[in-house]
Image (cartoon, helix red, strand yellow):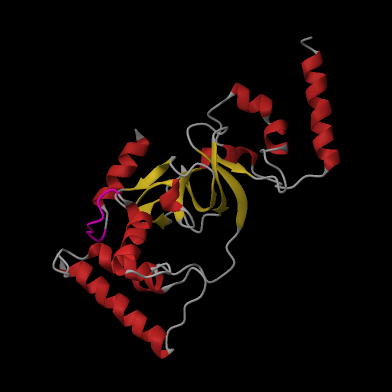
Amino acid sequence: MHLSKLQRERRLKKSYNHRISRRGYARFGKDLQKTLKVSTNLPRHVIWKYAHQNKQGGYNDDKTMAQAEKIDEVTKGVEDGTIHTEGRNDILRIALGTPEHSGVRASKPCKLAVGTINNIVAHGTVFDRESPDEKIHTVMLGESYRRVSVDYVLSPNALLPVPIPNEMTTLRDAHKSYVAWPKDLICPKQPNDVECGYYVMRYMKELIENQSIPIEENFNGKYTYTLEEIDEVRVEWINFIQEYV
């Protein structure tokens, strides 16, 4: 129920009208690339402008038109050398007024799940909250969600837990983008491992007894472990199981 409400709010708060239907920006960009007969990937701000134009090449409302003009202004500034882009702070992000945080924002590698914590669909990065009212894609994250980047996709057709209607609905659409993700479906990643490793082993009993545990909030701590620490948990599990054999 909460997720459905969040999605309705996201649709209501959508700032700019566009005409890309259900294709999503990633697919629209590929189609546009073929239409324009260019061999390189189109910049995000170019895709944004085409996506928001009507069939006559104009814009249907003043707000969208003003944003397109802002993109042109920033583009000219970049060409003139008066505006500088760096990393994810590209022309579109600057024009939309949502520049990436210039400081060092705490983040951790993670795995992203859908449905249950065992259904890993992508590898990503989870970012610490900057403020209680932090937003992403104009919608407040609230207490139940975290900002993540989708770095590597395992299941391209998996549906996003918090889709952006008509823009990003699947993991394929969200690749290399920031999205909101339920914090209880974010699994801390053990480097150089293919499982949740120490984390799941260490708290398996708690996870079994209470499947609704908010993972990040209750067990947030170390994210790398020595072999000795992992062996210690293995011994603990053996002793626990032996009590029932």
Closest to the observer, 126 or 163: 163
Does residue 223 appear to the left or right of 218 in the view shown? right
Closest to the observer, 43 or 59: 43
User: Is residue 135 on the magenta stretch?
Assistant: no
Residue at 20%, 68% (x, y): give it.
63
x, y percent for residue 86: 51, 75
Residue at 79%, 31% (x, y): give it.
233
Name the quadrant containing residue 98. bottom left
Q: Taking 236 as reference, is 82 above or below it?
A: below
Does residue 152 appear to the left or right of 136 in the view shown? right
x, y percent for residue 123: 57, 48
User: Which residue of the protein is positioned furthest toward the top in this rendering?
Assistant: 245
Q: Taking 23 as reference, is 61 above or below it?
A: below
Does residue 206 appear to the left or right of 182 in the view shown? right
Q: Is residue 69 visible?
A: yes
Q: Taking 157 as reference, is 49 above or below it?
A: below
x, y percent for residue 143: 46, 44
Closest to the observer, 135 or 19: 19
Q: Is residue 97 visible?
A: no
Residue at 83%, 41% (x, y): give it.
227
Residue at 61%, 22% (x, y): give it.
209
User: Which residue of the protein is positioned furthest toward the right in this rendering?
Assistant: 228
Span shown in magenta: 15-22
Name the quadrant containing residue 62. bottom left
Does residue 75 appear to the left or right of 216 in the view shown? left
x, y percent for residue 49: 28, 68
Which quarter of the image is occupied by the C terminus? top right
Which quarter of the image is occupied by the N terminus? top left
Total marks shown come to 0
Q: Main secondary structure of the magenta part?
A: loop
